[in-house]
Image: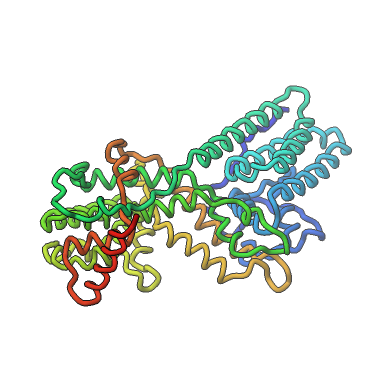
Amino acid sequence: MFLETPETMPQTPIFSSMLSSSCSGQVQPDMGEKCGDPVYQDGNLISGSLEALIERLVPTMDYYPDRTYIFTFLLSSRVFIHPHELLAKVGQICIKQKQQLEIGSEAEKTKLKSFAAKIIQLLKEWTETFPYDFQDEKSMKELKEIAHRITQCDEENGTVKKIISQMTQNLLMTLSARSQYQEIKEKFRQPVTDKGTILKNKPQSTQKDILSICCDPLILAQQLTHIELERVSNIYAEDLMQIVSHVDSLDNHKCRGDVTKTYTLEAYDNWFNCLSMLVATEICRVVKKKQRTRIVEFFIDVARECFNIGNFNSMMAIISGMNLSPVARLKKTWSKVKTAKFDVLEHHMDPSSNFCNYRTALQGAAQRSQTANSNREKIVIPVFNLFIKDIYFLHKMHTNRLPNGQINFKKFWEISRLIHDFITWKQVECPFEKDKKIQSYLLTTPIYSEEALFIASFESEGPENHVEKDSWKTLRTTLLNRA
């Protein structure tokens, strides 16, 4: 009898049947009276005890959990139990099932290899989807313990051992790559406050601006998309789940998410802020009104191209930069700008009705992505801070546990669906050619602080009222007196 390898294990698409009549898409396991407490509604699992949900995760001879369930449970479980503790419980259930097969008839014993294949498949999905769960020694120890016991099911030809060895090697490579990313992480860009850079004593004719680096809005939008996809590629599902874990600590113990740094989320959020400030800096620091107008119109066109690509995060950052007070107050500049296109952009990002217009556009991009034949059409980059808020509010609106003590799994279906969509979108390979010169400018050119932006704005167009005059005077005095 040949061992059924993980590669040949039948699978159902993630979330394709989550709301169908069968929640697992396969035969339900016989959990017995002890674990018979999961609650279903219209065929969908909506709640259960932690023990029952763990039991449902572990394969049996006649059952393998749906991929949707595996993803959702492994993602949400960290709110209630440490990954290494969950691994230990999974290991205990595996041992019991293995022992039952071993004491049975010869026919039962031949099923060990098939059972082993299913356990390997579960571990493979776990290590590939949530590699960071295995960053600590306790989790790795539990993984090795389960692997050792499963290897005993196939000592004759060593197939299981080879598969487990490859799985472990891939996991270690992933963890190493992530560790290196955090070690070489760039320092957050610090805004310029130097008075010589900010105050415009004379026209800066030789100073570079964005138009001297790239004058094609589509090309710049493509380079921004490159940077976005690079940033999100370092964000994992478990990082996003820390939004829930950080909000509260349940069951009177500290969850792993509470002690794990969320650098990747902070770095991505910082990129959004830097892009907004870069847009404002490029506009405010220009001396001549005609050139400022050109740059404003250029960024409006870049934002439009981002929208067409499906890069909503860069689009929102650009709009936010142009709506900052130092830019918005430049009335003489804006009077020369053809604002019809900007009005359309602001309509798409209108915050009323919970950003209804943006969500409609995002849904359209997501549908396009599902049926796309090219990576160009698959790109979906949501506005990250709105995406984070959606997870946060889903968490705050619904309790983790029901009054009877069961886990409110219906809540975690919704959260995991959001996160799975994001993880799917981030895996798209950027189809645009990378321009190192443009990217270097976008990532390293100096950006002004809010204080410096106001000074540059007043230098461009003088204060119009007493409030602005007082602000300008205070800011200049502060800057000139600064050591």
Q: Is residue 19 visible?
A: no
Q: Nearer the viewer, residue 82 or 189?
A: 189
Residue 140, image x and y in percent?
70, 39
- Toward the bottom, the furthest residue is 466
Residue at position x 63%, y 33% from top?
167
Q: Is residue 325 visible?
A: yes
> Which quadrant does the N terminus fall into?
top right
Q: Identify the image quadrant of residue 241.
A: bottom right
Residue 102 vertical position relative to residue 333 in the rendered view, above or below: above
Residue 470 vertical position relative to residue 243 in the rendered view, above or below: below
Q: Identify the image quadrant of residue 358.
A: bottom left
In the image, taking residue 109 as reference, residue 187 lies left or right, namely left
Q: Nearer the viewer, residue 429 or 300?
A: 300
> Which quadrant does the C terminus fall into?
bottom left
Residue 196, image x and y in percent?
25, 51
Residue 395, image x and y in percent?
56, 66
Task: Report how many numbered discs are placed on residues in the image.
Answer: 0
Residue at position x 33%, y 66% from top?
357
Q: How is the image coloured?
A: rainbow
Residue 433, image x and y in percent?
30, 36
Residue at position x 57%, y 35% from top?
176
Q: Nearer the viewer, residue 105 or 191?
A: 191
- Toward the right, the furthest residue is 103
Residue 356 vertical position relative to residue 376 in the rendered view, above or below: below
Residue at position x 62%, y 70% from top?
399
Q: Nearer the viewer, residue 13 or 242?
A: 242
